[in-house]
Amino acid sequence: MVDPTSDLNENTSEEDAPSCATCEAKIVDSPNHRVITWIDDGTVQSAHFCDDNCRIDWDGE
């Protein structure tokens, strides 16, 4: 898994890139990439999104 705080525009292969939590597309070299983080039972969780539309459409599962 790629560190969600890293710069995904550099040296990230499609194999190692995160997938969008909504549409499941691989996120490689995308200036519209969004990440949200939250704490769940004391553990940091994160979700990646292709863009704002996928972020808005995410159902939280």
Image (cartoon, rainbow, N blue to C red):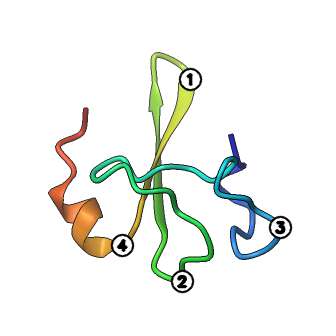
- Which residue is located at x 68 percent, y 40 percent? 1
In primary-sequence order, the first of circles 3 and 4 is 3
Q: Quadrant of residue 53?
A: bottom left
Q: CA distance from mark 2 to mark 4?
A: 9 Å
Position of residue 53 in the picture relative to residue 49 (left or right): left
Q: CA distance from mark 1 to mark 3?
A: 28 Å
Closer mark to the observer between disc 1 and disc 3: 3
For the C terminus, the quadrant is top left
Q: In this view, which residue lies farthest toward the right? A: 11
Closer mark to the observer between disc 3 and disc 2: 3
In primary-sequence order, the first of circles 3 and 2 is 3
Q: In this view, which residue lies farthest toward the top? A: 41
Question: Which one is nearer the viewer's eye here, 31 or 40?
Answer: 31
Label 1 element class: strand
The residue pinned by badge 4 equals 51
The residue pinned by badge 1 equals 43
Residue type (three-letter) at the residue carrying disc 1: Thr
CB atoms at circles 1 and 3 under 8 Å apart? no
The residue pinned by badge 2 equals 31
